[in-house]
Image: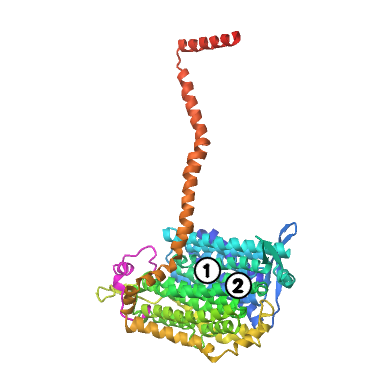
Amino acid sequence: MIQLLVFLPLLTALVAGLGGRAIGHTAAKAITTGGLFVSAALAWTIFIGFWLNDSAGYTVPVLDWIESGNLSVHWALKVDTLTAVMLVVVTSVSALVHLYSWGYMEEDPSQSRFFAYLSLFTFAMLMLVTADNLVQMFFGWEGVGLASYLLIGFWYHKPSANAAAIKAFVVNRVGDFGFSLGIFGTFLVFGTVSLDAILAAVPQHSGQTFSFLGSQVDVMTCLCLLLFVGACGKSAQLGLHTWLPDAMEGPTPVSALIHAATMVTAGVFMVCRLSPMFEASPTAQAVVCVVGACTALFAATVGMVQYDIKRVIAYSTCSQLGYMFFAAGSGAYGAAMFHLFTHAFFKALLFLGAGSVIHAMHHEQDMRFYGGLRRHIPITFWMMTIGTLALTGFFFTAGYYSKDAILEAAFASGTSHGTFAFFVGAIVAALTSFYSWRLVFLTFFGQPRWAGSEHIQHAAHGDHGHDDHHAHDHDAQDDGTAGYHPHESPLSMLIPLFVLGTGALLAGLVWHEKFVGAEEGAGFWRGSLAFREHLMHAMHEVPAWVVWTPSVAFFLGLGLAWHVYLGKPSIPKWWQNEVPGLYQFLLRKWYFDELYDALFVKPALWLGRLFWTRGDQQTIDRFGPNGAADVVVVGAGLARRFQSGYVYSYALVMLVGLAAAAAWMMR
């Protein structure tokens, strides 16, 4: 079963990618989508077995892979509760994204290639989450990076898409370098890359140190921090986050797949998979917790001022990943995975809902040109409202249970970094509520502001560009809407919204006791991650004000967004004029891109130009191949002077040569 689940997406990707032209778009889409739904059905079967406590963990060998000295790597598929959770998340979201793409990419000329990339990405992610050893995990890790590069830059004719794909690839390579060093160090210390062997041997190496620059460094801390660098790159944590917003250049289904439930959660999964190692290093846990909290705060502040609907949701993803990491850093690995699980439903719902809005608005992504859409696309409106309720933690939605569990666990951990993360998380919860409802109010409420959009103007006049995949009705009225009437998305795009909306409402209610329950949690996870039962008990004993803090934050953010964007719409413009420095600071994303441009990009370009002009052209080429060629040319020119064809010239040369020889003999 597990072999079919994992390798079926690879098979369908090969068929669609290599044979797409022969079988046609419809067959390619049907094969890839059908394969993913089969994988999703198998994943749910495995997950339900663990949910009902009917299954035990197991490993399925595939083949012997690498044998080199003491290094022995076998390709095997590891299945336990942690794997089962990720299998459900990855395959379910991917299957729904495939179905959604039938409508969204309907008129794209490269549909077969797109669906092949989606299935290839899913296979790489499945290889990552079923990895039995660190080398196999790294294989899936890099495969996800490659597939994300292809998907982000899918519309390669757009320079912005190419730049975003390269940026994602390069930034992730920085994190992957740290991850690879962590793998090398782990093999050096443990003598194996097998996950089971490593985690079983952690107590033996706990407390060991090594000397570095005259200081004693804890071995487990060093290894965990190196591995965490890889997690920061893949999961867009502060410092290596800059690729995530730019990745919105890819088609909207790509955003939902990569940034909701799969690639960006790989770092969280890796930390939870290796949680016994992190448990052996309180310093590493503190770093994970603080970095996660700071990332959550950074992304929430930036999300408040963005106007691109997809970028707002992207920064929300970055912020929620911060929640997951500071949960893990607080020792609540079950809560981190619970939020990963619930987040997959409501964030995929928001991304696909945003795609439905963009489709309705003729591929306009600026929310300043929306307004009043709830009357035109009511299904999308209600689905995005459900996603927003779940994201902001409204009572009894999925996010309510998982976000509350994280904040309560951080407070109950009793550590200074856990307390810091709790208060930061509470502030972030209010900011999340504010910018999430800001998105809803700007998009679906108020008066239509469509007339100012160039995309909408083109649509109103029947000027369809290459990305304008769907026709809409137009009329000649000048009512502030550019004569444009948005229509609801096709059924293939709405069905995934209903499924994800159901998950966003019910996932927390159904599974919260299994993931974070003090009584059922340990039996559910069964050692697949470090589960602190005492912390889960402590969560239920926190003061009442801690329990109510997320709900208070929800209503504060909702009320402020209502007042600012519906009650007094002049406030945003006034705020921009009164505190332009702060507004620009947030709008420019804390100037991280400018800082990196000054510190890394420009020096690298200057150094490259120096090596190119001074090193390559003026030194190597001048004295190397170009110099040798010049010598040949000059020599040939001189020799040509003697090849005149006149007998007296040759006689003169012979005479000079004879005189020179005689002089030499007579000396």
Location of residue 376 in the rendering, given as x and y in whole percent from the top left corner: 35, 79
The residue that appears at 75% across and 56% down in the rendered structure is 69
What's the coloring here? rainbow
Residue 214 sits inside the magenta stretch:
no
Q: Nearer the viewer, residue 140 or 377?
A: 140
Q: Secondary structure at mark 1?
A: loop
Q: Nearer the viewer, residue 13 or 277?
A: 277
Q: Is residue 327 left or right of residue 61?
A: left
Q: Which residue is mark 2?
A: 269
Q: Label 1: how many residues lie within 10 Å, few (<14), some (14-19) or many (20+)?
A: many
Q: Is residue 31 in view from this perspective? A: no
Kind of residue sitting beneath label 2: Phe
Kind of residue sitting beneath label 1: Ala
Q: Label 2: how many residues lie within 10 Å, few (<14), some (14-19) or many (20+)?
A: many
Identify the disc placed on residue 236. Answer: 1
* Residue at the bottom extreme of this rendering: 544
Question: Which segment did they paint magenta?
Answer: 443-470
